[in-house]
Image (cartoon, rainbow, N blue to C red):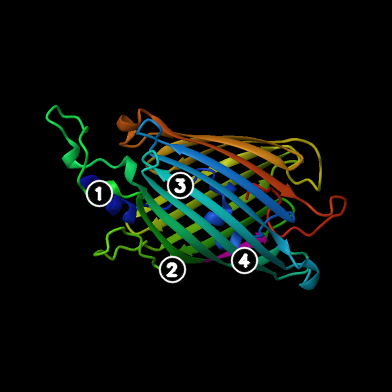
Amino acid sequence: MLAFLISASVAAHAQDVHYSQYFVAPLSVNPALTGFMDGTLRAMVNYRSQWASVNNAFTTGTLSVDGNILQSKIPANDRLGVGLQVISDKVADGLLTNNYVSASAAYHKGFDKEGNYSLGIGIQGTYSQRSIDAAKLVFNDQLDAYGNFSQTSADAAAKSDGLRRNYWDVAIGGVFKARINEKQQFYIGMSAYHLASPKVTFMSNQQLTVPTRITWNGVYEARLGDMVSISLLGMYSKQEQASEGVFGTILTIGKSWREFDKTPVFYAGMLYRTKDALIPYVAAEYLDIRLGVSYDYNNSNLNAATKGQGGAEISLSYLLRIPPNKKIIYLCPNNPKF
């Protein structure tokens, strides 16, 4: 039963799921990023395997779809975005599974005729399920005289199909965007997740809840030429005693400031997760379909346990622009990696 209690306690205080390519999972970073794009609709898929050498410690998959609606009903420089996100996160080779389904909405208000400045406010509701697979639990009374866990456990938890806890949660966020001139633009956002403080422990006599997560994120993009632009980006999250910072730069080669151009675009960059890992990133995009790959090279104190193996991550995204033959007023930086 000891392993079960430890799993439950750790799960209650665990940090939220995270991606190195967090910019391809915008709805998990800030609800205000819903509809914050240079198109009409986008779909994104992410998969991450972290510390595979440590019994498949974390594997995470995300699917998100969001877009802008009612454009003819609101001012030309405003946007109303809606989105849906599904996350499945497995810990310790599936011993603990967290599933999340989130719906979000955001309104972006333009402050000038050109749409250079805007402020967006977003909200997100999430239904979550946390479960433990009892078949993967090991109990003290299973230990035989030879040091093997070969005996049948008398613990009640071992005879169950597992344990589940379902709960609702809510998040809010804001984002400010500014286009400085024809060559420079930026945005900065802030969000707060787990405002409902849901109880997630599997033990009925405990009141452990998910702590609020505060996240800051931002991007500065500069156009260096007709075929080259550079982005400085970063995200910082704080959740109780856990914190995470990811900062770096991405170079874009191709007509990244295009207007419905069909030429390929290539991305190459380097990110750094503070006190944890170096993260090279490469991606290729054609016809608004982009495939991105990154890998965490762990350089923290966990390096001995992980054997230097950090997290492999892959993303696939699609951005739909309607209509494809007309110029539209972009609300956000033209590079859809944001």
Three-letter residue code for mark 3: Asp
Q: Which mark is residue 89?
A: 3
Query: Quadrant location of residue 146?
Result: top left
Query: On the image, numbered disc 4 is attached to which residue?
Result: 105
Left/right of residue 252 with respect to residue 306 in the rendered view? right
Three-letter residue code for mark 4: Ala
Query: On the image, numbered disc 2 is attached to which residue?
Result: 195
Q: Could you tell me which residue is drawn at 57 percent across and 59 percent down?
A: 188
Number of marks drawn: 4
Q: Residues within 10 Å of mark 2 (few under 14, many from 20)?
A: some
Q: Could you tell me which residue is drawn at 35 percent across and 28 percent down?
A: 307
Q: Nearer the viewer, residue 15 or 249?
A: 15
Q: Residue furthest left?
A: 145
Three-letter residue code for mark 2: Leu
x and y percentages locating residue 294 in the rendered image: 53, 35
**Magenta span includes 175:** yes
Q: Which residues are magenta?
A: 172-178
User: Spatial distance from mark 4 to mark 3, Cα to Cα?
Assistant: 23 Å
Going from N to C along the chain, the mark reached first, 3 or 1, is 1
Q: Which mark is residue 62?
A: none
x and y percentages locating residue 235 in the rendered image: 49, 52
Query: On the image, numbered disc 1 is attached to which residue?
Result: 6
Going from N to C along the chain, the mark reached first, 4 or 3, is 3
Q: Could you tell me which residue is drawn at 42 percent across and 69 percent down?
A: 196
x and y percentages locating residue 248 in the rendered image: 52, 43
Three-letter residue code for mark 1: Ile
Going from N to C along the chain, the mark reached first, 1 or 4, is 1
Q: Can you say whether 33 is above or below 6 in the image?
A: below
- Closer to the camera: disc 1 or disc 2? 1
